[in-house]
Amino acid sequence: MTQVELRHNWQTQEVLDILEAPLMELLYRAQGVHREHHEDNTVQLASLLSIKTGACPEDCKYCPQSAHYAKKTGLKKESLMDVDAVLEKAQIAKEAGASRFCMGAAWKQVREGEDFDKVIDMVKGVKEMGMEACVTLGMLTQDQADRLAKAGLTAYNHNLDTSPEFYKEIITTRTYQDRLDTLDCVRKSGVTVCSGGIIGMGETMTDRARMLEILANLDPHPESVPINALVPVKGTPMGDREPVDPLELVKMVATARIVMPKTRVRLSAGREILNREAQILCMMAGANSIFYGEKLLTTANNDTDEDQKMIKDAGLQVA
C-alpha cells in the first residue's frame, strides 16, 4: 500500500504537522515510506574533503571558514589543494569504503581561471576512479554548471540552510534566491542536486518545516538531502549554542523521508554528538547515507571503523 505519493505541492502546515507528530507515529510512517522506495536496505558512504579552506567572504554565522570571524576562530587560510593531493585523498576514501567523494571550496562563487580548471581536473580524476564526484563551490553560472557536467560531475551541493524567513538572521552576503538560482543552474546542466539544511541555529519548528517544504516542492526532488545539526565552533556568532537534542535530528530525517520519498537522505554534520543508537534511529527514520571519514570540512567526524561496525550491527549493507 502506498504510504505517500510523490508530490511537489506541499504546504507549510502539512509539513509542520508531520514534523510535530508523536515520535512513534512519525517513525512508523517514515519507515513505511522508506521500505517502499528503498528496498535495498543499504547505506551509502560519502567522504568530504575541504580542497580550499578559510577566507570565505560570506558571513554565515555558523561557519568557521568565514573571513568575518577568522581572528576569533583562528582558522588559517589554505590555498586550493593540488589535483594529485586531492586524488590521493579520494583513493584513500575509496579504499575505506566510500563510493562518493565530495570536495568543498570556501568560495562565495566560482570564478573562471586556473583554480576552476583544477577543480575540473579533480572531478575527472575522481570519476576515473569509479567513484561518484560531488563538489560544493558556492554560486554557479549556467556555463560553469555545464562545464562541471561535461567533466562528469555526479552531484553539486548547495544547501538552503534554513527557511527564507530565518535566512537573513544567518547570512546577509547572499540571498535565498541566489541559492535557488544556483540549484536551477545545476538542474538544467543535468547534474544531480544535493541540498539540505542545518538545525539548531535558533530557528523555529515552522522554519524547519518551511525549509523541507521548499526542497520537497522542487521538481524533481533533490536526489540528495543532507540533514545537518549545528556544530558550534568557538569564535563564530553561534559558537555558544547548545547542541541539538538528537531526537530533533531524528524527526527531521523522518519528515524529509516522508515528503521526499525517493531522495537519499544524508546524516551529515553533527553526527559526532550522536551515540550509536541515535544514529541507528536516524537510519530507521529514513537516512540512507552518512558522511564518512575523519573530518567534515573543518569539523571532526566519527571514527570509520566504528561506522562500519554500526552499519553491520544495524543489519544494513554498504551501497
Image (cartoon, rainbow, N blue to C red):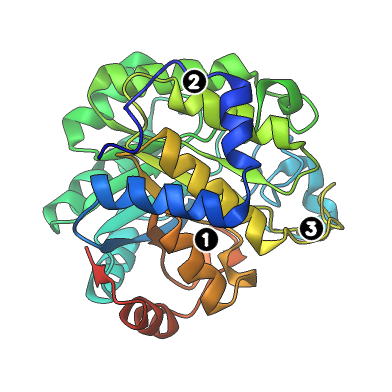
The residue that appears at 66% across and 27% down in the rendered structure is 163
Give coordinates of residue 200: x percent, y percent: 73, 49
Which of the two discs, 3 and 2, sits closer to the camera?
2
Q: Note whether residue 13 is visible.
A: yes
Q: Quadrant of the N terminus?
A: top left
Position above or below: 76 against 3: below
Query: What's the CA distance linking mark 3 and mark 2?
Result: 40 Å
The residue that disc 1 covers is 296
Taking the image as shown, residue 82 lies to the left or right of residue 319, namely right
Q: Residue 185: which quarter of the image? A: top left
Position above or below: 112 against 159: above
Give coordinates of residue 81: x percent, y percent: 42, 55
Q: Which is more toward the observer, 233 or 249?
A: 249
Query: What's the CA distance linking mark 2 and mark 1?
Result: 31 Å
Q: Secondary structure at mark 3?
A: helix
Q: Are marks 2 and 1 in contact (CB under 8 Å)?
A: no
Q: Are marks 3 and 2 in contact (CB under 8 Å)?
A: no
Tag shown at residue 241: none
Tag shown at residue 73: 3
Tag shown at residue 10: 2
Give coordinates of residue 313: x percent, y percent: 36, 83
Give coordinates of residue 264: x percent, y percent: 34, 46
Q: Quadrant of the C terminus?
A: bottom left
